[in-house]
Amino acid sequence: MKGKSPKEKGKRSSAKTPRFAFGKTLRTGFVFSFLLFTFSFLLFAQAPQSARGVVRLKVRYKSAAGMKDLPRKRFFLIAGSLDQNKSLLEKLKALNEPSLECFYRSHGASPALIKWLRDGDCESVYCREVEDKYLSGAEAVPEFQKAFEQALTELKDREVARRWLPNYLAPELRSGFYDQKQKTIQALVSEAETTTKTSPMSIMTDRKGTAYLTNIEPGIYTISNLVASETEKTSILWICEREVKATDLGTAMKRPMILSNENDPKVKCEVIEKPLPVCN
Amino acid sequence: MPPVRGLREINKMLASYRHLALTALSRALWPCVIVLFFIGGTGIVGSIAAQTRRRPRPSQPAPQTQAPRGSATRYSAFLHSSDKHKSLGCNECHKIPTAWTAKRNFPDAADFPDHDACVRCHRQQFFTRQAMIGTGPTICTVCHVRAAPREDARFAFGKPNNSAQQAKAKDERQFMIEFPHDKHQNVIAWLHVPTGAQPSRLRGLRQARTLALQSNERTRFVSASFSVPLDDKKPDYNNCSICHQTDMSLAIVALAAPNADPAMLHPFKSMPRTHDSCFNCHWKNQKPIATDCAGCHKAAATFVAELGRKRISAKFAHEGGKGEHVAECTTCHINITRASTTRGLTPDVPVNACASCHRDSKKTTYPKAVTIETELEQFKTTGNCTYCHTEDVGKKKPPPSHDAAVQ
């Protein structure tokens, strides 16, 4: 057999070339993707928690007795600016919810029950245990006395009857005010969800009026208590805007967002303060 | 006397006694004998029935399809998740209240369902010859300690169970508890002002001691007890303390002087474990009510109850800090008021919460040993953070958050 012609050899070598080129491309691709992966991994691994934001709320109000912290009130974080949430905010402003006292009076609650609720800053009877002194004697609450008697008949044990007493109260006296308020809040939250396509986050202030909204996607947000919070003489509704930047908790703790019923040029807030209505 | 006599002879003998039946006395006695016979007979039958029947038979429910026969082992465990069981309402088997006066001082689902709940579908698993082979019907051991006709002893139902019943070897439960902290925080007042002869904190400790007696499932910690002096000045944050009291069943060894703090013995809070905590409000009317089991108990494929939470700063004493841990619970547990579920719930206390007091730059009355900076220094020399952490956590490198918190 004759050896292969140079033409044929050339063909052969040219046939080999693409295979070599493919290998090279593969290697380059591999290196590139490895680098890309490493880079993205490092980026992800190093992405500090500060990729998300934190807001420390500090809520206080000026009353006749001086500056006070607003304890145990729920605030909501709604995605979008004040302008973007305009229609929702108009509804907030137009709300005319009854005060706690007016609600309970309209449902025939005794002054003793209203006092018991106010003393504990309670919106419903579930908020604290009914102590013995409210079942008899000078401070007795008639509604509690009646419910206790009914509970005792059924449960037999005096102590159990006292602790389980709220089960035997009429619904509107048990939690009517709270339920009505929650219904309004839920309707507003649902509307916010529909508008913004995200669920509003909520948090409650502690006794010093402080609350943390953590793990927030950076952006512009509306912060509000949605339904005006009752203080001694007034009800206050906050509607504020805040740009949340990526930051950590430590920084947020040092720089709280202060909500107050006083004018503060640093905070973009609309504060609607109304005197509590006089109940009939 | 010959054993058999002729009919004529028997009649003759009976005739000799006929005079008795005809006397006035016998006439009066016969009705009494009949009445006594009935009373006695009923009594005997009744007592036999009483021995056999342990509980009064409830009204007969609608007949149900019998479960198919299967191997005995198949019926050794009860699965709430089986198709048939899932199709039933909880209250078709679990009656509330069960015989509550015997086990609790409040109406509760305190025991397994009655026999009828099982037998109405599983008659074959109870009464066939196959079921009786060996140690008896395996299905009995779902509730009973042994499968025997006269065996009354049942495993403990629910925990804690103060009836001193035996617990099942494998503590695997089929439900998780769903508890929305956010909703409950909304309704519960933040501060409870103790009044009367028994301040709430003392009551809390007493309740905690009761819990301690009921629970004996701790291995990592040593048992200890001490009396906490009543401190009326310390506020009682009702929004948390209504369910979480000092857990006297969980103790760590007290630190040596000069940092000895008796509160360190029992640093943690307990979790509610009985329906009592829920039925206060949810017994009736307030949904989910007591009969709506699924309102709180959510099905889980397998769930091993976690009685103790994983502790990171295991030496933090809620009641300690030399009386200075007076902040409201939600001041440190910053996310709890937004937690809508207990799934994945952690104590969630950022180190920044500790740094608000325990750092050098803060002018506090604490000795230097309790600052985070000192703890970090200690790690550099000993490789262990021992003031706040137990060894398992303390030997790990402090996370960047700790450095950041004290900068």
Image (cartoon, coloured by chain):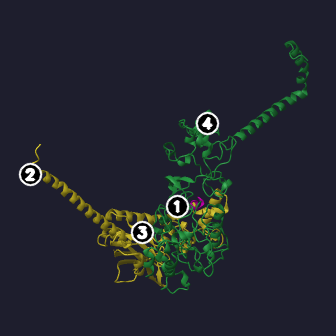
Chain colours: A yellow, B green
**SS class, disc 3:** strand
**SS class, disc 1:** helix
Q: What chain does badge 2 belong to?
A: A
Q: Which residue in the structure is indicated by mark 4?
A: B131
Q: Label 3 to label 1, Cα distance in Å?
A: 27 Å
Mark sitting earlier along the chain (2/1)? 2
Q: Are marks 4 and 1 on the same chain?
A: no
Hey, which quadrant is residue A20 in on the image? Answer: bottom left
Residue found 57% across the figure and 57% down from its top: B283
Residue B227 in the figure: left or right of residue B31: left
- Name the mark on residue A6: 2
Q: Could you say which is closer to the camera, residue A33 or residue A254?
A: A33
Mark sitting earlier along the chain (3/1)? 1
Q: What chain does badge 4 belong to?
A: B
Q: Which residue in the structure is indicated by mark 3?
A: A202
Residue A92 shown in magenta: no
Q: Nearer the viewer, mark 3 or mark 4?
A: 4
Q: Label 4 to label 1, Cα distance in Å?
A: 52 Å
Q: Are marks 4 and 2 on the same chain?
A: no
- Residue B201 in view: yes
Residue B83 in the figure: left or right of residue A245: right
Q: Which stretch appears magenta? A: B274-279
Q: Which residue in the structure is indicated by mark 1?
A: A171
**SS class, disc 4:** helix
Q: Nearer the viewer, mark 4 or mark 2?
A: 2
Q: Main secondary structure of the magenta part?
A: helix
